[in-house]
Amino acid sequence: MSRRQQPKPSTADHNGVSVIQSQAHATSSSPSLPAAITGLQQVPQLIPANPSAAGGKSIPPSKMKKPSVDKDSDEYRQRRERNNLAVKKSRMRSKQKAMDTQQRVNELKEENERLEAKIKLLSKELSVLKDLFLEHAHNLADNVQPPSGVEGTSPVPNSNPTNGQ
Amino acid sequence: MSRRQQPKPSTADHNGVSVIQSQAHATSSSPSLPAAITGLQQVPQLIPANPSAAGGKSIPPSKMKKPSVDKDSDEYRQRRERNNLAVKKSRMRSKQKAMDTQQRVNELKEENERLEAKIKLLSKELSVLKDLFLEHAHNLADNVQPPSGVEGTSPVPNSNPTNGQ
DNA sequence: AACTATTGCGCAATGC
DNA sequence: TGCATTGCGCAATAGT
């Protein structure tokens, strides 16, 4: 939890000025605020981030286009606030999506197991039936030799020993 | 691409002061930097974010514990830099994981289709075999009646409509 | 032209 | 003490 930062080494500061201000809209929600330091409203204030006098060598006067961002502007704050909301929303969605995807994985895994079990079952059934056929075929081949009281005569369709998986 | 901000309305500012500084470490990588405004190094400078004079009513002088964060400190910058690195790493992992999960979903979907196809096949095979059995059974039934050869004793290949699934 | 949605980034709190 | 995570705000920019 924290929000603003100050000029940092890397990339660009977007602008040559750092503005210090705020407005206490307090629309934001902080799940785990460290303390109760909320009511912090500074007076909008422009501060040249490029104190040509001081650090000395830094910030080439060139390339410092439009300071026209005016952190003060009421409109700016509104835009920021809206964007912050949009950001939160977007991130929530993102997380939700990730969770859903994970959930989907679990569901698919279960489904897979079910299907595999079914396949196993069907395979077994098929195997049994085929064996019966084979047995019968043998009986026929060996001609009329009743191994047990129940036999007859019938065309043996296929004699396929190989089990087509 | 941007980094620092300034005091904002919402939550807390962590501290009552806004520091403006930088150090041009330039370790960061900006995928899509807007321009070449990189070499921005401000002179570390402390600026009281709470100009008691100006806006007037704001920021109770109380609640402003330890400004002891010292954005200046070389060590602070090092810590920040390391953390930034860790953050990037963590986020990369997170994204990678999300993508992997999505990939997993796709794989599982495919697998599912394969399994379903297999089930369909097996079911069909089974169905055929069962039909054969039934047919045979009927033949037997219509057959084993004439102990003596007085009747029409020929296997009647009746087509059995009943089908076990 | 004006908005919202996304995305990369840095900070700080917190988890481990 | 240090890395890892996570929420947050900013700004750029993609999408409408």
Image (spheres, coloured by chain):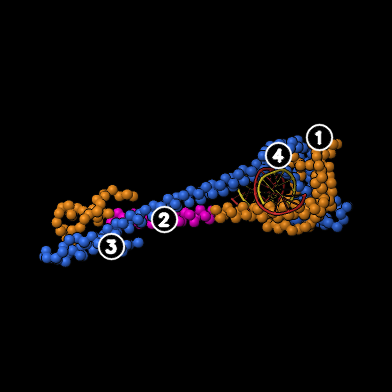
Chain colours: A orange, B blue, C red, D yellow
Tell us which disc is closer to us: 4 or 3: 3
Tell us which disc is closer to us: 2 or 3: 3
Q: Are marks 3 and 1 on the same chain?
A: no
- Estimate how packed mark 1 is, as few (under 14), some (14 to 19) or many (20 or more) residues with alpha carbons within 10 Å: few
Q: Is residue B69 visible?
A: no
- Estimate how packed mark 3 is, as few (under 14), some (14 to 19) or many (20 or more) residues with alpha carbons within 10 Å: few
Q: Which mark is residue B33?
A: 4
Tell us which disc is closer to us: 3 or 1: 3
Work out how far the residue at label 2 is from the one at label 4, CA to CA, in angstroms: 51 Å
Q: Which residue is mark 2?
A: A115
Work out how far the residue at label 2 is from the one at label 1, CA to CA, in angstroms: 68 Å
Residue A62: percent from left, percent from top: 81, 35
Q: Amino acid at mark 3?
A: Asn
Seen at 81% across and 43% down, the residue is A67
Work out how far the residue at label 2 is from the one at label 3, CA to CA, in angstroms: 30 Å
Work out how far the residue at label 3 is from the one at label 1, CA to CA, in angstroms: 94 Å
Q: Amino acid at mark 2?
A: Leu
Q: Which residue is mark 1?
A: A62
Q: Are marks 4 and 1 on the same chain?
A: no
Chain letter for mark 4, please.
B
